[in-house]
Image (cartoon, helix red, strand yellow):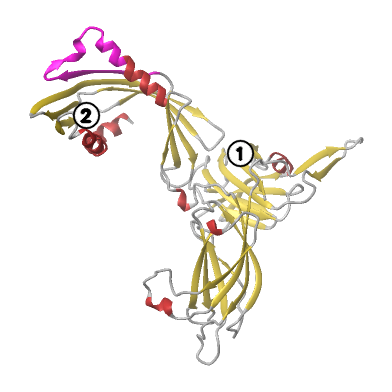
C-alpha cells in the first residue's frame, strides 16, 4: 500500500491541491471587498514529495458484509503553502510548512458487493485525537515561536477535529451510485396487473396486430416479464398479474413496452410508456391509463402519432420495517411443535438468499466451484470460480412467495464445472439443506454450514425473510 501511494503521490498531490483551490475560492471571495482586502490568492501550494505512510494496520473480521480496518497513518510532509492577501495595497503573506500529522482512523467499508470497487460506502472516524505539528509564518516571521501560542494552536486544532470526527461520529462517503439497484436492499413488492389495451396500431399487412406487453423495473438486470400474446387483436384484454421486487421507490420506474409478435422477423414495437413508482401510495391500488408513445424523447416527432392506450393497475406493498415475527413455533404438552401466524393471517414476502463463500471444497477431477440454490423448484446459480478451493461469490438471490415458508427448505449444492464438452464435466462438491423456520421466526440467519458429502467443506450463507 505504501508503494502504491508513493507511486501515485505526484498525481494525488496535483489533484488534492486543485481541489483545495476549488473549495477555498468561494471562501476567499467572501472576504474580498471587506476590511480593506482587495485580493486573496495562493502564491504556492504543494504537499511536497513525501506521501503519507502506513505504519501499521489492524483488520477486523466481521460476519456481516463489512470490512473494518484501523490504519496508523503518519505524514512527515514538506508541504509549502503560501497565501498572499492584498490589504490597502499592502501585501500580507501567510506561509504554512513542515506539516507533520499522525492519526489512527477507523475505516469501515460497507456493504461489500461483488462489483468493482467491491464496497458501496466508506465510513471514516478517528479513534483518538490526531497529532498535528507545523510551522506558520506571518510576514516572514515564525509566529509559532511565540511562547504559549504553539501549544494553544495545536490543542485547538486537535480538539476541533476530534469534535467533528472522533468516534462515534462518522463521515459517510458514498462510492457506488445507488440508482443501479445493486447496492440497495429490497424494500417492498410491486404488484402489476396488465388489464387491457385500446386502439392499437395495425402492423400486419393482411391482418391486425398480435400484441404483448414486456415490462421491467429500471436499475435491475433481471430479465423482463411478458404477458401472453393476443393474436389478431387491436383491443386485447389480459388481466394478468406480475410482481417485482422494489429497491428504491423514489427513483425507480416501471418500463412498459408493447410489441407486435412475429413468427419469423423481429417483433415490431407498438409503443411504450413509463410509470415512476413515486406516484404510488403504499398499500393503495392505482389505475393508470397510458397513452403509448414511440420513445421517451419529448422531441421525437413520431410521438405525435396516436398509438393507442394501455391500462394497468399498480400496488406497492412495502416490507414491514419492524421485522416482527410472522409466525411462532409453540410446543404442546407432549413436545410436539406447531406453527401459528403471529398476525392471524398468512403474509407473502421475499426470501433473500446470499451465498457468501465456501472453504476447503475439493473435487476428484477438477475444482472450479459454483453454488446452485434450489427453492420450490426455482433454481439459481452463482458464477464459476476457476481453480480454487476457497471460492468467494457474495451473490444474492431473490424468491417471491405468497406465504411464509415455515415448512420449506433451501437446498444449496456446491458443484465444479470443467470447461468444454467432456465426460463428467460436472461434479458435486457437497450440499446442505437449510430449514427456513428460524428464518421466518427471526427474520434473518447468517451461518456457516458443513457441506454434506464433503470431507472438510463449509459454506457461509445469509438468509433474510421480509414480509409485506
Residue 148 is a magenta residue: yes
What is the quadrant of residue 154 in the picture? top left
Residue 345 is a magenta residue: no
Q: CA distance from mark 1 to mark 2?
A: 51 Å
**SS for callout 1:** loop
**SS for callout 2:** loop
Q: Which residues are magenta?
A: 129-154
**Could you tell which of marks 1 and 2 lies nearer the N-terminus?**
2
Looking at this view, is 37 or 276 the one in front? 37
Q: Tag 1: Cα neighbours inside 10 Å, few (<14), some, or many (≥20)?
A: many
Query: Which residue is found at the position 56% from the left and 56% from the top?
Result: 425
Which quadrant, please, contains the N terminus?
A: top left
| Residue mark closest to the camera, 1 vs 2 | 2
Q: Which residue in the structure is indicated by mark 1?
A: 457
Residue 371 in view, yes or no: no
* 375 versus 77 height, above or below: below
Q: Which residue in the structure is indicated by mark 2?
A: 47
* 354 versus 331 height, above or below: below
Looking at this view, is 71 or 138 the one in front? 138
Amino acid at each position: 500500500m505504501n508503494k502504491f501511494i508513493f507511486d501515485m503521490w505526484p498525481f494525488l498531490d496535483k489533484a488534492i491541491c486543485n481541489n483545495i483551490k476549488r473549495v477555498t475560492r468561494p471562501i476567499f471571495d467572501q472576504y474580498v471587498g471587506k476590511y480593506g482586502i482587495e485580493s486573496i490568492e495562493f502564491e504556492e501550494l504543494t504537499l511536497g514529495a513525501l506521501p503519507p505512510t502506513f505504519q501499521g494496520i489492524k483488520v477486523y473480521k466481521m460476519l456481516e458484509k463489512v470490512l473494518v480496518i484501523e490504519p496508523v497513518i503518519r505524514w512527515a510532509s514538506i508541504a509549502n503553502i503560501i497565501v498572499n492577501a492584498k490589504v490597502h495595497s499592502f501585501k500580507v503573506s501567510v506561509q504554512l510548512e513542515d506539516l507533520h500529522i499522525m492519526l489512527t482512523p477507523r475505516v469501515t467499508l460497507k456493504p461489500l458487493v461483488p462489483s468493482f470497487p467491491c464496497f458501496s460506502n466508506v465510513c471514516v472516524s478517528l479513534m483518538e485525537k490526531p497529532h498535528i505539528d507545523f510551522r506558520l509564518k506571518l510576514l516572514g516571521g515564525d509566529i509559532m515561536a511565540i511562547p504559549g501560542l504553539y501549544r494553544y494552536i495545536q490543542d485547538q486544532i486537535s480538539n476541533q477535529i476530534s469534535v467533528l470526527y472522533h468516534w462515534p461520529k462518522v463521515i459517510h462517503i458514498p462510492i457506488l451510485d445507488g440508482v443501479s439497484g445493486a447496492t440497495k436492499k429490497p424494500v417492498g413488492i410491486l404488484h402489476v396487473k396488465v388489464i387491457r389495451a385500446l386502439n392499437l396500431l395495425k402492423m400486419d399487412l393482411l391482418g391486425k396486430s398480435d400484441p404483448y406487453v414486456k415490462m421491467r423495473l429500471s436499475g435491475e438486470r433481471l430479465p423482463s416479464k411478458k404477458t401472453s400474446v393476443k393474436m389478431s387483436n387491436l383491443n386485447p384484454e389480459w388481466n394478468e398479474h406480475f410482481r417485482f421486487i422494489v429497491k428504491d421507490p423514489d427513483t425507480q420506474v416501471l418500463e412498459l413496452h408493447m410489441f407486435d409478435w412475429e413468427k419469423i422477423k423481429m417483433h415490431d414495437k407498438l409503443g411504450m410508456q413509463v410509470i415512476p413508482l413515486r406516484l404510488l401510495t403504499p398499500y393503495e391500488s392505482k389505475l393508470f391509463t397510458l397513452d403509448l408513445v414511440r420513445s421517451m424523447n419529448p422531441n421525437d416527432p413520431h410521438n405525435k402519432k396516436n398509438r393507442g392506450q394501455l391500462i394497468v393497475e399498480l400496488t406497492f406493498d412495502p416490507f414491514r420495517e419492524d421485522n416482527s415475527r410472522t409466525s411462532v413455533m409453540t410446543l404442546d404438552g407432549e413436545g410436539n411443535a406447531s406453527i401459528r401466524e403471529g398476525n392471524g393471517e398468512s403474509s407473502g414476502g421475499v426470501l433473500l438468499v446470499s451465498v457468501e463463500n465456501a472453504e476447503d471444497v475439493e473435487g476428484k477431477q477438477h475444482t472450479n466451484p459454483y453454488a446452485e440454490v434450489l427453492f420450490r423448484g426455482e433454481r439459481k446459480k452463482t458464477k464459476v470460480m476457476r481453480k480454487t478451493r476457497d471460492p468467494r461469490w457474495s451473490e444474492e438471490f431473490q424468491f417471491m412467495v405468497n406465504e411464509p415458508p415455515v415448512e420449506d427448505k433451501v437446498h444449496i449444492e456446491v458443484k465444479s464445472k470443467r470447461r468444454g464438452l467432456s465426460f463428467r464435466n460436472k461434479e458435486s462438491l457437497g450440499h446442505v439443506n437449510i430449514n427456513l423456520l428460524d428464518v421466518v421466526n427471526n427474520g434473518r440467519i447468517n451461518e456457516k454450514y458443513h457441506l454434506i458429502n464433503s470431507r472438510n467443506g463449509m459454506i457461509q450463507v445469509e438468509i433474510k425473510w421480509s414480509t409485506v
